[in-house]
Image (cartoon, rainbow, N blue to C red):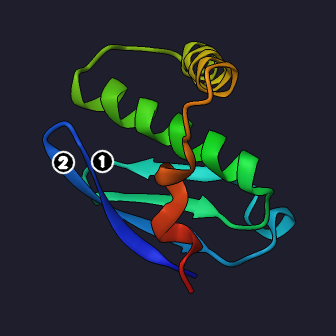
């Protein structure tokens, strides 16, 4: 899979593409602040990968700013921001550009 870097507030994250079937990994994405990685399962559609990266970006902001958001709130923000972008022709594909490179 592809790999790249993404800056989120004060941290530079390594974006890691996981080329394993979803049913074996049981995770779509994983944010690890101390490790400085965001891992994304590639066994999902491009739209789902974009949504997953958005979710992990929100997780990073939540962690860095100590917001105390629960998973339900993170999912709500992810769904809401994704819908705003979609409905206003804001291209979120840049979030996954480095993951797509082989």
Going by the image, does 99 lie left or right of 33?
right
Quadrant showing the N terminus:
bottom right
Percent position (x, y) of residue 43? 78, 66
Residue at the image position 59 percent from the left and 51 percent from the top: 29
- Compared with 10, 85 (above or below) is above
- Say which residue label 2 marks: 11
**Separation (CA) of disc 1 from disc 2:** 8 Å
10 Å crowding of disc 2: few (<14), some (14-19), many (20+): some
Left or right of 17, for residue 49: right
Q: Residues within 10 Å of mark 1 (few under 14, many from 20)?
A: some
- Tell me the quarter of the image containing the C terminus: bottom right
Residue at x-position 59% and y-position 25%: 85
Dots 1, 2 in contact, CB < 8 A: yes
**Label 1 secondary element:** loop
Q: Position of residue 101 (x, y in %)?
A: 53, 79
Q: Nearer the viewer, mark 1 or mark 2?
A: 2
Q: Which mark is residue 33?
A: 1
Q: Quadrant of residue 4?
A: bottom left
**In the displayed image of the protein, which residue is found farthest to the right?**
23
Task: Point out residue 47 in the picture as x, y percentages from the top left corner.
Answer: 73, 47
Pick the front one: 91 or 24:
91
> In the image, what residue occupies the spot 56% across and 40% down?
91
Q: Residue at x 81, y 72 (%)?
A: 21
């Amino acid at each position: 899979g592809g790999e790249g870097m993404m800056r989120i507030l004060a941290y530079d994250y390594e974006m890691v593409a996981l080329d394993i079937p979803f049913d074996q990994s049981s995770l779509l994405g994983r944010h690890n602040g101390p490790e400085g990685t965001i891992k994304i399962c590639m066994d999902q559609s491009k739209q789902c990968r974009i949504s997953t990266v958005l979710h992990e970006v929100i997780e990073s902001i939540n962690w860095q700013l100590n917001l105390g958001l629960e998973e339900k709130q993170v999912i709500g923000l992810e769904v809401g921001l994704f819908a705003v972008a979609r409905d206003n022709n804001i291209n979120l594909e840049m979030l996954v550009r480095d993951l797509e490179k082989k």
